[in-house]
Image (cartoon, helix red, strand yellow):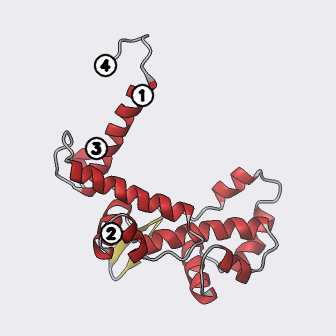
């Protein structure tokens, strides 16, 4: 610990932050485990999941498959899907489609591209699947969204328009169970909160 008023070295502050972040993720992925110890294997698993998520954020417009993402981090597709869903509350495919829909929303607000062109621009290969997923996440079809947003965000700065028009975190009921959308899964251990 540093005394009050002393200057902490940036590298030590960063190291402390990284350690804390890993401990938090550790509890999300492995409830009931000790918060003071992460094995190298557990730490590696957390890093690999973050790499997959970062890659989807960067390369959302490319044709990505769960198998390809899993190969990139030396996991099987099934293991990646299970661990990703446990950590983030949704499957890798669902997360990728959410990123694509968010980018499509920005394109629909700020460009004159047709809905079909937007669909292909964000990496979707089927207009029907894109429209269905867009409607599921946003609540209205892409063409209706464009019409509504032209009126709703007129005169707003782009950063504010992006924030207010982002798909809301919401829970969806499927087959009698609650599915969390667009946010990280809550910690399972109540003692952690």
Disc 1 on helix, strand or loop? helix
As measured in the structure, the alpha-carbon distance from the residue carrying label 2 to the one carrying label 4 is: 37 Å
In percent of the image, x 68 and y 75: which residue is there?
Answer: 121
Q: Position of residue 7 (x, y in %)?
A: 44, 15
- In which quadrant of the rendered view does residue 6 lie? top left
Nearer the observer, disc 2 or disc 3? 2
N-terminal of the pair, mark 1 or mark 3, is 1
As measured in the structure, the alpha-carbon distance from the residue carrying label 2 to the one carrying label 3 is: 20 Å
Q: Position of residue 164 (x, y in %)?
A: 65, 57
Please give the residue where the numbered disc 3 appears in the rendered image.
23
Q: Position of residue 128 (x, y in %)?
A: 60, 89
In percent of the image, x 22 and y 53: which residue is there?
Answer: 41
Disc 3 on helix, strand or loop? helix
Nearer the observer, disc 1 or disc 3? 1
In the depicted structure, whether residue 190 falls above or below residue 85: above
Q: Residues within 10 Å of mark 4 (few under 14, many from 20)?
A: few
Residue 109 located left or right of residue 133: right
Q: Which mark is residue 1?
A: 4
Q: Which mark is residue 11?
A: 1
Q: Residues within 10 Å of mark 3 (few under 14, many from 20)?
A: some
In percent of the image, x 37 and y 70: which residue is there?
Answer: 71
Nearer the observer, disc 1 or disc 4? 1
N-terminal of the pair, mark 2 or mark 4, is 4
- In which quadrant of the rendered view does residue 143 lie? bottom right
Q: Residues within 10 Å of mark 1 (few under 14, many from 20)?
A: few
N-terminal of the pair, mark 2 or mark 3, is 3
- In which quadrant of the rendered view does residue 119 lie? bottom right
């Amino acid at each position: 610990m540093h005394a009050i008023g002393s200057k902490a070295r940036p590298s030590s502050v960063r190291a402390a932050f990284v350690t804390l972040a890993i401990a938090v993720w550790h509890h999300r992925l492995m409830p009931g485990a000790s918060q003071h110890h992460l094995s190298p294997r557990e730490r590696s698993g957390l890093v690999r999941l973050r790499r997959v998520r970062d890659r989807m954020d960067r390369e959302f417009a490319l044709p990505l498959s769960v198998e390809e993402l899993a190969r990139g981090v030396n996991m099987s597709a099934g293991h990646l899907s299970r661990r990703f869903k446990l950590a983030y509350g949704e499957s890798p495919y669902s997360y990728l489609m959410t990123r694509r829909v968010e980018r499509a929303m920005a394109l629909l607000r700020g460009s004159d591209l047709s809905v079909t062109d937007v669909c292909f621009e964000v990496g979707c290969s089927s207009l029907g699947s894109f429209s269905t997923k867009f409607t599921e996440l946003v609540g209205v079809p892409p063409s209706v969204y464009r019409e509504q947003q032209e009126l709703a965000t007129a005169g707003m700065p782009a950063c504010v328009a992006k924030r207010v028009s982002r798909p809301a975190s919401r829970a969806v009921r499927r087959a009698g169970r609650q599915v969390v959308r667009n946010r990280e899964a809550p910690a399972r251990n109540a003692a952690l909160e």
